[in-house]
Amino acid sequence: MRLFNSLFSCFKNRLKRGGEGQTAAGDKADDGDDTWNLFFTLQALEVATNFFSEANKLGHGGFGPVFKGLMPNGQEVAVKKLSMGSRQGLREFTNEVNLLLKVQHKNLVMLLGCCVEGPEKMLVYEYLKNKSLDYFLFDKRKSSSLDWTKRFQIITGVVRGDDTHLHTFKISGTHGYMAPEYAMHGYLSVKTDVFSFGVLMLEIVSGRKNLDRLLGSDKADLLTYAWELFQAKKTMELVDTSLIEFNPDEAAMCIQLGLLCCQASVSERPDMNSLHLTLSSDSFTLPKPGRPGIQGRAGHWTTTTSTALTNTKDSSMQTGITKTSAGSSTIEYYSRNSMSYSSMDEGR
């Protein structure tokens, strides 16, 4: 039997209600849209998580502990308590959450709402209970089932929000996938998902975790290593060596897009629609990425300004991309993979 019966079954409803614990009241978006329930009550989350008991603790993400909860309507949720170090003000925080609820890409993150009662701010996500991508991608005994065709389908399917190729790849808020503005300062951004997706692309192409200290200091951080290989025009060295065959042009494009998604400056990251257009086009303009957002020794994030690169079939040694492109100008604690999919047949 095939390993994948279907990588399918995304949510039909973009937002599931949290039952009695979620309110709409004056918690609407500024544009007057009253169809989005934003706030969960503290009491409801306390009951759902058994008062944030250790037994319900799922782990400690990049910006606070995460607890499993069960809402009155039977929905399982993951509640992230943001640390007091977040510098984002209450109004700014709630506005960003409201915006994220409306524009979030369904295959990356399903944020259900937030709680701002008391001194702490909390984010409420859908609970992931299916096997994660790393169960297959990072285990060399199983990764052979993920040939290049399947890996590229995963990447393009996530970007499209495709309901026919995969289930739901979702990224938890942990350091290896977190955008710098969130990891360092607790700021939510509508392009936080884009940064996370960039790391995901690099993991899928390379078949390794975003942090693996066993590989040595030069290769431990995937984002840094990918950037250094790109600078040295050795992009193909990042591709998973377990792949018997792969499309070098598609692989090079995914690596370059991954680096563009991981720019430290929010404005320099593409949006998911731009990624979709690029991955589905025969002709496109792909700028050269600047230095991505990486954590330095001093604990800060850096980037550089770079000029654009003209990609043509004759310049594939520089970019590895054969799709025709015109030039353009561009200014420019980690985690395990927590992306989940289900409806799988493991060949039993």
Image: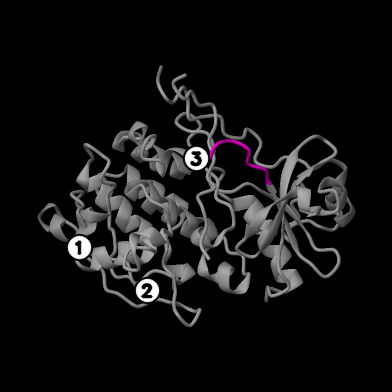
Asked if residue 260 shows in the view, the reply is: no
Residue 87 placed where, x, y %? 67, 76
Residue 4 placed where, x, y %? 44, 25
On screen, residue 199 versus residue 218, left or right, reads right
Residue 151 placed where, x, y %? 36, 39
Type of amino acid under label 1: Thr
State the residue lying farthest toward the bottom.
298
In the picture of the structure, the residue carrying the numbered disc 1 is 310
Type of amino acid under label 3: Gly
- Neighbor class of circle 3 (other Cα within 10 Å; few <14, some 14-19, many 20+) is many
**What residue lies at 30% left-to-right and 38% top-to-bottom?**
148
Asked if residue 251 shows in the view, the reply is: yes
State the residue lying farthest toward the top.
1
On screen, residue 104 versus residue 80, left or right, reads left
Question: What are the residue bounds of the magenta stretch?
Answer: 126-133
Rendered position, 166 above or below 257: above
- Neighbor class of circle 1 (other Cα within 10 Å; few <14, some 14-19, many 20+) is some
In the picture of the structure, the residue carrying the numbered disc 2 is 332
The quadrant of the picture occupied by the N terminus is top left
State the residue lying farthest toward the left.
314
Type of amino acid under label 2: Glu
On screen, residue 102 versus residue 295, left or right, reads right
| 89, 52: nearer the viewer | 52
Residue 277 placed where, x, y %? 37, 47
Magenta stretch: helix, strand or loop mostly: loop
Q: Quadrant of residue 280?
A: top left
| 145, 108: nearer the viewer | 145
Counting residues from the N terminus, which is met first, the one under dot 1 or under dot 2?
1
In the picture of the structure, the residue carrying the numbered disc 3 is 161
**Cα distance in 3D space between marks 3 and 2:** 27 Å
